[in-house]
């Protein structure tokens, strides 16, 4: 039979699986000799057993009773003892923090008799005793018996206009009777006077709260496994509400907002913890405790220093002072902002508390990305009208518009707009694309607006519920009667959720300036980031390249630390004025016209490549041959059909329409593109390869060091690659240029037959965008807006597979391809060039499966460098995983 | 060092890998004591070594010399011996027959001296000797030296209007001089007088012919591995051209056309084998040999009987009679028509030569399918105007049209049309769909017309090169001045390639009548098919179900041996008049309107299901919930846009256009469909499940035995299935009906996570159409017509992956899913419902991976039954694999 109950003296901080976060840390503090009220923890294993069987597992009742008896012996008083009752709290505490989701009952142990004993023991403090009793009935009634709202109403009725502190013992005694009536009324039974029954029912209620609908939903959204269960902590009560020499507070060992060292926290005299949370009374800064109770203050500061040294990190703390005696009720490693994370990590390393490896693991790529978004200038006083959910980071300024059509119209006139909607739906897509930012009054982080904005990398604040959006009137109303009409300027902060009236100046991130080489080197955030990045670069095994199609992008990528180009898309070179040349290629009546069209394109491509080779001199540049179906370069079939049918089209339009119809595909993503184009259109790929080879030769002749890699897209069978490779190798050798020839792995079959494909490839680059689309069978354009929000809500995805590599599906294909490709060709170079290359979790995955490099947009390069470093460190120090 | 040369006495018929088909069978006949001219075989291993190194492997030269010396000793004469030369033939012979692809040189051993010895030994038959010599130079010049055409011209010049037999010894002697001049002229060297050099050069030429472009192309198309190499047979020459007491012939042990027992073959007096092939002189029926040379005839018949008993199969034979002495030059198991295959297999079983297992393996599903196509009535005398390639089987009759537009127009008027083109291209798709059959004058079996027609299951004759097609004039001209104008009736036979003028009556296949139960039971083909099918059914492990959406189809499937329905597509029930109800569903403004639309559909669906359950009473019926995106039920976006833009649309059209635009998808195949619809549209799947459950309950109340299985399409993650399953199970239990709930495996991710998905599935059904599309990343509609022909030509595919399961890609995913699905749930039912379920090779694969059943169109059920039986038999008797 497993051990279901651990005394606080028996556990430690590493037993979170079994004791939950709270229980493990209470045990740790107990063993450090800190003043923790005695108590014990019921394990999550007991909870799982209870949830499976609907009853306490055999032995649990006895174990609890034994620990309770020992607690009573130690404290010299018994639960429910009439003259001097022991009171306990019953608190949930799971492995992962689920704030606000789980249950707590305080003051277990009171009944009509023991309340008088408590009063007597409290030196005749009747008010305290009856207040404690009514709190018990209220929390028990709500949590254990499921009675909602009626206790609060009764309290309000009694209070009238008075302040909490004005209520008397008699008031609370009367309230207890009212509360007992509410319980009888709602459940048909009396509030249990048996204090052991109180405790048992509270424990069961905490167990069951694990499966409350809101807890289930929360876990789904946060990807917390559903079968962990919660531990339960039974802790001797201490009272911050025993008078003005008592109180309760929360504290941080450093500023969680900035990372500055100092004393941060709040204190509330004569109160219990829930009063602080409820916010009905105003707290004072923790510093004030130095004058209120200097001894307790000094002790607290000493304990905080001890905890920080012990945990080697920022800790947050809950404490209570009962009649001058300090008690520690909770501690844990505290949450912090992105800037604080970097500063604290470097501070701790400077203090010698952690080494630099550890410091790097404390700073995430997500946090670095946050620091790189432009921000509103904090020095400018702006008028914040509300705060919504920070759905997609960034800072956007523009004129408010209330319909998608209007957003498109104004954007076409060159205006920056913020699209304001109650909520968005697929019909708003055009407007969302046109807008600088999106603001909604409804919906959470998985709403349509949030999902689509994140997919687009567009700033979004959603669920700003204080706003009333009247689309028809073209107006929103904010608290305090603020009215915003169409055309008024709004500024929205997708990183914090803040919404400002008027234009707030946007400032560049100092972290971006750091990467650009223009930052103030004395800025301590910049210094912290520099330390972390240098160490991450030293540690990482993965190379980091850029997806870049122009010399300008390539140069920026290089400044950001890019070690080459992993994906240079040549189709982007066919846009703008060159589109007409591509049209000529498509309209070519025969071989000669086609070759003429290709000949016209070749010098332009060659110039493009020269520019990129120059920017990336000495570093590899992977050029992907043309990928999209040719009809993508032609006008839209509906628009053109209508134009021609209504007589507004030219002769060329009529010709183009024929071509558009001929080339029209039901599913262009699954159509004539990539290597298929190369095999079907004579000369197309040859032209591109020649342009690359000639550009490289020209650079070399000018003393440069061009390193071209030619990448064939959409290969599904080695036979396709063989034919193109043969042609390419012949051209290269005629030009006297050396270049690797490899392929993207973006079709599931390519991964499944990687062992064959590697016979003809010098490198693989995983095109995880297409690979995700084909592995799941959905096209991002079509489905992200149509149902990803629902899928995220319902827990089908924890995160969009277009953001983070889906390990079980796409990731499995990647593992197959890596393993079987390397088996065929041990020196096969392996990289990734889908957008996942800049996603932290995906970078870690790429490190795990043993890729050689990741490639991502220039802006994400620092994130990838950091995460690659963290992944390498995690791989060598198992305790950080 | 391996043994590179085998005497005919050393090999046997099972050594085809090493000795090639011809060499192995020559050895087999030698060992049977049949009159085979002595000789030896150089192995394919020697060829592979030669091709890799460009030179004879060490030891080969010596081995050849030793065997040649032994041959000379045995024959008592030497190669090139002036007074009595040994002559040999040098013939290729690979493991797989590659007719017309590989090389042969006869009469090696002649030079200016030995030709005279040959003449003397031939009793002064100078004509024979000089004819043999000129043949040597001609074949050697062409095959070994690569000189084309000029020998034939010289022969023609010499001959003038005379017949071959009129040429004299002097003529041939003169021709030899001319030929030697041609050789000197073309190569700068003399024709080699050294007879051993002749032989060595001929052997090398045969080796090299393996890599001739046409051989490479042929192997690619026939999926013969490229690295096998060919064996070379050196065989003592015997001469059918030594006078009227000599000759050469071919024979079959049974009629390869019908399977009838009897004597079938052709004989040509005073001739060598190539004269028969060239067709310059007319052969006589083999029976005539009974009078020409009764002794040889009797001996041949005895040998043929012996061979058939020995090989236990129809054999074909090449033989030569030299001055009354019979020599066997080749035998092999002969090719035959589909009808012959069935008749012969059953005859041999009746004779006790083979058992029924073996008989079943001798009849392929492809052959059975051929027998099931409708045929032209052979009793009606029709005017055949030409024969092209049999590109896609069937018999089609219709009016000739020469453009796609015209095909569509006439078809819309209810006319049957045959689309006649020089060749087709993607723009002809519409016309091909509208036509009953397609006829082209250019292009082979991988041409656009052939590939697309096969994909559509439409009759096609392609590459009818004798036809001149004039599209502009709307006319074709056939040999003999036959002119066919637009509107004239043509009949084309896709099974034989024949093209007839006028209407030829089409008769039902007796085999189809057999399955329908209406056949004449005394028809011996019907009796043969019956025997084979009964035994295949007994042997097979795979169940065979039908893809059927109506009661009528279900009933036919049952007559054809279907053991249930593996795929009932519910979307087909939303067409026709019901389309408007679906439109209402799509246009519904809110929950109530949507539910009203669903309520209107429910009774119709329920009636559909009742009908199907009735037809399949007692057998499982797998109903797939709606799969396609809803916009497929709406009008085409281009048509509707033009209609509305040009003011020809109604109010409803305008409303519909909005919906069409809202629902428009870039890639509908990868869009909002299948389980995604079920999760996004409240009530849709529930309506369908309820209709199934109520139909089943109603059938049960009427005493029926309905067995519903509910199938969820397009699942990619177990979480999707769990949610739908929960809803379905609740509805079923409310209705009091039991049904399995399972999923299609048609998205690669479903296969990759099958272990998880099996947790929520009672069965898997592989949807290999979509699985193929997503695994390869191409949509059949878009790419088959655009590039499959090129891919087949270039050997990227051996066969379209939509016809036969691609083992390496799609098949690998299936194996993963089978293995991991069963690991989770050992009783998981596994089937396939893609079109591959009726493809012979794919059925065998399904047996191999251990599926429980295949499901296919009713018409393909017999094919699947037969192939399932063959696969089971092959699995238990390894020698047939």
Image: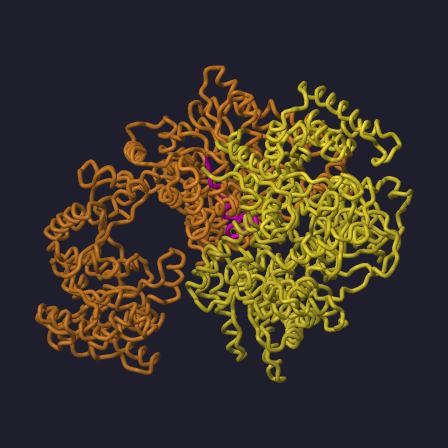
Chain colours: A yellow, B orange
Residue A353 found in image quarter:
bottom right
Rendered location of residue A322, percent (x, y): 73, 43
Rendered location of residue B196, percent (x, y): 20, 76
Q: Nearer the viewer, residue A19 or A89?
A: A89
Residue drawn at x 60%, y 33% as measured from the top left: A203
Residue drawn at x 33%, y 66% as measured from the top left: B210
Magenta stretch: dominant secondary structure: helix
Q: Nearer the viewer, residue A170 or B468?
A: A170
Check the image and report above or below for A400 versus B689: below
Rendered location of residue B845, percent (x, y): 38, 45
* B820 sits to left or right of A362: left
Furthest toward the top, the residue is B702
* B65 sits to left or right of B382: left
Q: Is residue B502 visible?
A: no
Magenta includes A310? Answer: no
Q: Nearer the viewer, residue A257 or A516?
A: A257
Magenta includes B764? Answer: yes
Rendered location of residue B813, percent (x, y): 45, 48
Q: Nearer the viewer, residue B785 or A435?
A: A435
- Number of on-image labels: 0
Q: Is residue A753 visible?
A: yes
Quadrant of image for the N terminus of chain A = top left
Quadrant of image for the C terminus of chain A = bottom right
* A386 sits to left or right of A704: right
- The residue range painted magenta reads B763-782
* A697 sits to left or right of A552: left
């Amino acid at each position: 039979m497993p051990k279901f109950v651990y005394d606080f003296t028996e556990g430690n901080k590493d037993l979170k699986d079994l004791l939950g976060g709270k229980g493990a840390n209470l045990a740790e503090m107990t063993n450090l000799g800190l003043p923790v009220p005695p108590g014990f923890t019921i394990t999550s294993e007991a909870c799982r057993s209870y949830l499976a069987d609907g009853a306490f597992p055999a032995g649990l009742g006895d174990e609890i009773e034994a620990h309770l008896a020992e607690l009573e012996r130690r404290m010299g008083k018994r639960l429910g003892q009439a003259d001097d009752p022991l009171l306990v709290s019953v608190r949930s505490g799971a492995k992962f923090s689920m704030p606000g989701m789980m249950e707590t009952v305080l003051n277990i142990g009171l009944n009509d008799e023991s309340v008088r004993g408590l009063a007597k023991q409290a030196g005749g403090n009747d008010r305290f005793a009856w207040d404690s009793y009514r709190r018990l009935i209220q929390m028990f009634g709500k949590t254990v018996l499921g009675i909602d709202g009626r206790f609060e109403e009764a309290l309000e009725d009694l209070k009238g206009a008075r302040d909490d502190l004005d209520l008397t013992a008699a008031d609370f005694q009367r309230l207890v009777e009212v509360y007992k009536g509410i319980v009888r009324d709602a459940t048909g039974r009396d509030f249990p006077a048996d204090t052991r029954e109180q405790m048992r029912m509270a424990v069961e209620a905490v167990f069951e709260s694990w499966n409350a609908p809101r807890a289930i939903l929360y876990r789904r959204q946060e990807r917390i496994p559903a079968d962990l269960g919660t531990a339960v902590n039974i802790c001797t009560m201490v009272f911050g509400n025993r008078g003005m020499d008592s109180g309760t507070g929360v504290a941080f060992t450093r500023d969680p907002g900035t990372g500055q060292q100092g004393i941060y926290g709040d204190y509330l005299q004569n109160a219990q913890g829930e009063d602080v949370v409820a916010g009905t009374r105003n707290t004072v800064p923790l510093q004030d405790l130095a004058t209120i109770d200097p001894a307790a203050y000094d002790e607290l500061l000493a304990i905080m220093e001890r905890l920080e040294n012990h945990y080697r990190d920022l800790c947050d703390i809950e404490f209570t002072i009962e009649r001058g005696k300090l008690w520690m009720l909770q501690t844990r490693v505290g949450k912090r902002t992105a800037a604080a994370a970097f500063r604290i990590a470097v501070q701790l390393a400077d203090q010698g508390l952690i080494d630099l490896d550890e410091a790097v693991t404390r700073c995430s790529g997500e946090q670095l990305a946050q620091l790189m978004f432009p921000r509103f200038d904090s020095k400018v006083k702006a008028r914040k009208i509300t705060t919504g959910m920070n759905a997609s980071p960034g800072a956007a300024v523009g004129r408010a518009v209330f319909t998608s059509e209007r957003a498109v119209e104004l954007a076409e006139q060159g205006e920056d707009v913020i699209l304001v909607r109650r909520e968005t739906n697929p019909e708003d897509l055009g407007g969302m694309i046109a807008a600088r930012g999106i603001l909604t009054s409804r919906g959470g982080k998985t709403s349509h607006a949030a999902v689509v904005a994140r997919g687009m990398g567009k700033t979004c604040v959603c669920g700003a519920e204080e706003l009333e959006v009247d689309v028809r009137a073209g107006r929103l109303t904010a608290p305090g009667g603020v009215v915003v009409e169409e055309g008024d300027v709004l500024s929205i902060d997708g990183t914090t959720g803040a919404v400002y009236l008027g234009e707030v100046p946007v400032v560049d991130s100092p972290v971006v300036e750091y990467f650009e080489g223009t930052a103030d080197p004395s800025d301590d955030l910049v210094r912290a980031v520099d330390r972390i990045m240098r160490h991450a670069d030293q540690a990482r095994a993965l190379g980091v390249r850029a997806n870049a199609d122009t010399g300008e992008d390539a140069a920026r990528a290089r400044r950001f630390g890019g070690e080459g180009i992993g994906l240079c898309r040549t189709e982007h070179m066919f846009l703008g004025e060159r589109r007409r040349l591509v049209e000529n290629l498509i309209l070519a009546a025969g071989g000669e016209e086609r070759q003429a069209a290709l000949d016209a394109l070749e010098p332009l491509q060659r110039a493009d490549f020269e520019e990129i080779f120059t920017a990336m001199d000495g570093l590899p540049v992977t050029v992907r041959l043309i990928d999209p179906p040719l009809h993508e370069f032609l006008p839209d079939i509906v628009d053109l059909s209508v134009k021609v049918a209504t007589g507004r089209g030219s002769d060329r339009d009529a010709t183009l329409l024929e071509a558009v119809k001929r080339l029209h595909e039901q599913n262009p993503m699954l159509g004539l593109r990539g290597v298929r184009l190369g095999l079907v259109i004579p000369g197309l790929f040859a032209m591109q390869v020649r342009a690359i080879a000639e550009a490289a030769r020209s650079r070399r002749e000018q003393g440069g060091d061009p390193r071209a890699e030619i990448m064939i897209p959409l290969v599904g069978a080695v036979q396709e690659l063989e034919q193109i490779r043969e042609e390419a190798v012949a051209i290269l050798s005629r030009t006297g240029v050396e270049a690797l020839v490899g392929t993207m792995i973006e079709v599931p079959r390519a991964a499944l037959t990687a062992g064959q494909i590697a016979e003809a490839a010098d490198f693989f680059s995983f095109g995880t965008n297409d690979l995700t689309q084909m592995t799941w069978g959905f096209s991002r354009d079509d489905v992200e807006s149509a149902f990803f929000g629902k899928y995220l809500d319902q827990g089908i995805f924890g995160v969009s597979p277009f953001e983070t590599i889906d390990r079980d599906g796409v990731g499995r294909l990647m593992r197959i391809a890596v393993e079987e490709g390397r088996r065929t060709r041990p020196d096969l170079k392996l990289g990734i060039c889908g957008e996942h290359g800049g996603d932290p979790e995906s970078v870690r995955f790429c490190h795990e499966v043993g890729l050689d490099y990741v490639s991502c947009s220039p802006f994400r390069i620092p994130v990838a460098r950091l995460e690659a470093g963290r992944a390498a460190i995690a791989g060598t120090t198992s305790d950080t995983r």
